[in-house]
Image: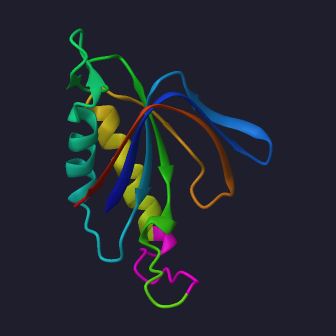
């Protein structure tokens, strides 16, 4: 399981021209599920995302979590995080989990975040999503478990 975690001021996600989800500030999290990832990983990933201290405190130090600042998480499924382009120029996605299982783990991650007190918005699994994102910093963290 891999996440690209970005601190954002505003993020909006649309499908077929219709606004599906948006957050005023917090984290845009692009989540990839690797083939063979097990059901214990969503809880560990959610715990890391909820506790990650990448928001600034009163002294300008990255010392606060998304929960501490009252931010939200927009969780976006992203199988292309497991694209392998080491051989040629066309990525192979054989490392990505099959869609049915990946969706289960994606949904489980969203539920685990909610259980930790984080407001979570989601995209539409498997859809062609259009994302408008206003990065803050920019701060981008890649976390894989």
Residue lying at the far bottom of the rendered structure: 87
Residue 76, position in %: x, y? Answer: 50, 49
Residue 69, image quadrant? top left
Residue 10, position in %: x, y? Answer: 55, 27
Task: Give the answer, above or below, for where 112 lies relative to 124.
Answer: above
Along the viewing direction, whichever of 97 and 39 lies nearer the viewer? 97
Query: Which scheme is used to colour this image of the protein?
Result: rainbow
Q: Report the residue at 27% width, 31% height from top.
A: 54
Which region is colored magenta? 89-100
Q: Report the residue at 36% width, 71% height from top.
A: 34
Residue 30, position in %: x, y? Answer: 45, 51
Along the viewing direction, whichever of 86 and 30 lies nearer the viewer? 86
Residue 55, image quadrant? top left
Task: Give the answer, above or below, for where 132 lies relative to 145.
Answer: above
Task: Give the answer, above or below, for where 117 lies relative to 74.
Answer: above
Taking 8 as reference, is 118 left or right?
left
User: Does 35 lie within the magenta span?
Assistant: no
Query: Magenta residues: mostly which secondary structure?
Result: loop
Residue 26, position in %: x, y? Answer: 42, 27
Taking 93 as reference, is 5 left or right?
left
Residue lying at the far top of the rendered structure: 58
């Amino acid at each position: 399981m891999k996440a690209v975690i970005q601190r954002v001021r505003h993020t909006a996600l649309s499908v077929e021209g219709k606004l599906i989800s948006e957050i005023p500030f917090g984290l845009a999290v692009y989540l990839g599920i690797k083939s063979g990832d097990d059901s214990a990983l969503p809880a560990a990933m959610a715990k890391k995302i909820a506790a990650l201290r990448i928001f600034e405190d009163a002294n300008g130090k990255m010392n606060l979590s998304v929960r501490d600042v009252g931010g939200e998480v927009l969780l976006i499924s992203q199988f292309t995080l497991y694209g392998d382009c080491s051989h040629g120029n066309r990525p192979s996605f054989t490392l990505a989990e099959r869609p049915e299982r990946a969706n289960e783990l994606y949904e489980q991650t969203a539920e685990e975040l909610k259980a930790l007190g984080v407001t979570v918005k989601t995209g539409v699994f498997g859809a062609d999503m259009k994302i408008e994102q206003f990065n803050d910093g920019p701060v981008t963290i890649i976390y894989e478990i």
